[in-house]
Image (cartoon, grey):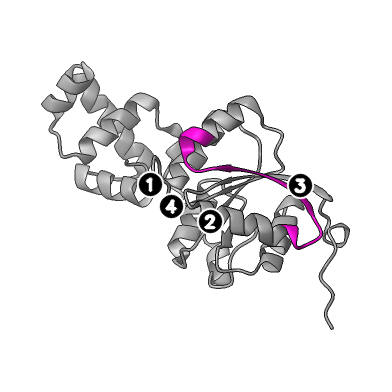
Amino acid sequence: MTLAPQPQALGISEHLRVLIIDDHQLVAEGLRASLKQQDLHLEMEIALNCARATEVLAQDQNFDLILLDLSLPDSKGLRFLRKLSELGVMIPVAILSGSEDPEDVDLALASGACGFISKSSSGQHIFRDISAILEGKLVTPTFYPRYRRRQPLDLQVDIQAITPRQMEVLQLLAQGLPNKKICSQLNLTEDTVKTHLKSLFMHLNVHNRTECVRVAEKWNLID
């Protein structure tokens, strides 16, 4: 008979605080129940959307780990991951997703996630993944080819350099608005909008508006 691993044996504290951001209450509750079966004293706060997660973190950042779903009702998970970084939240964040697309793992790791955990994993497997992440190890799902871990994604793309105003321009650009309409919406001069577009093209390593929107969609920068 195979004995279940004990928390101490995996380098994990008996008391663990986790914030799970997932709009599926049953998934979150199922994960809570599954992890508690590992003889672990688990305190799990559940936020069903990014707005609620922001409220929780504004009051309390004493969590060991954040588990973040990719698809949320009020924001894309990777956009919220970057927002956490902008807000100075220092808690490790791992993606918890049902996706089996290696590119989603690429994007998550490039956006600052410390791991990618599959929702289809058993409770014991998720427990091991969490322990590994808290030990500072990079965790990826079994479907993710190992060779991809050695290939940085879009090194010429500098997401962190995009300013809030440039992000506003990008949202309107994605809606197909011409420069004059963007000027009107944001109360900017046309020269200023052109300057923001030039910066966006540089940050995203593109040469035109179509490429800019395509790359922004790939990086989940667009609502």
Q: What whole-number distance in Å separates the C-alpha atoms at marks 4 and 2?
A: 36 Å
Q: Say above or below: 157 vs 59.
A: below
Q: Residue drawn at (32%, 42%), measured in percent from left and top?
A: 222
Q: Are marks 3 and 2 in contact (CB under 8 Å)?
A: no
Q: Residue drawn at (47%, 41%), measured in percent from left and top?
A: 49
Say which quarter of the image contains residue 208.
top left
Q: Are marks 1 and 3 in contact (CB under 8 Å)?
A: no
Q: Residues within 10 Å of mark 3 (few under 14, many from 20)?
A: some
Q: Which residue is mark 3?
A: 16
* Local SS, label 3: strand
Q: What whole-number distance in Å separates the C-alpha atoms at marks 4 and 1?
A: 14 Å
Residue kind at label 3, given as amino acid type: Leu
Give x and y (percent) for residue 209.
21, 42
Say which quarter of the image contains residue 205.
top left
Q: Earlier in the sequence, mark 2 or mark 1?
A: 2
Q: Which residue is mark 1?
A: 220
Residue kind at label 1, given as amino acid type: Asn
- Tell which tag, 4 or 1, sits nearer the viewer: 1
The magenta stretch is 36-52
Q: Which residue is mark 4?
A: 154
Q: Nearer the viewer, residue 202 or 81?
A: 81
Left or right: where does residue 38 sit relative to residue 178? right
Residue kind at label 4, given as amino acid type: Asp
Q: Nearer the viewer, residue 127 or 219?
A: 127
Q: Earlier in the sequence, mark 4 or mark 2?
A: 2
Residue kind at label 2, given as amino acid type: Leu
Q: Which residue is mark 2?
A: 26
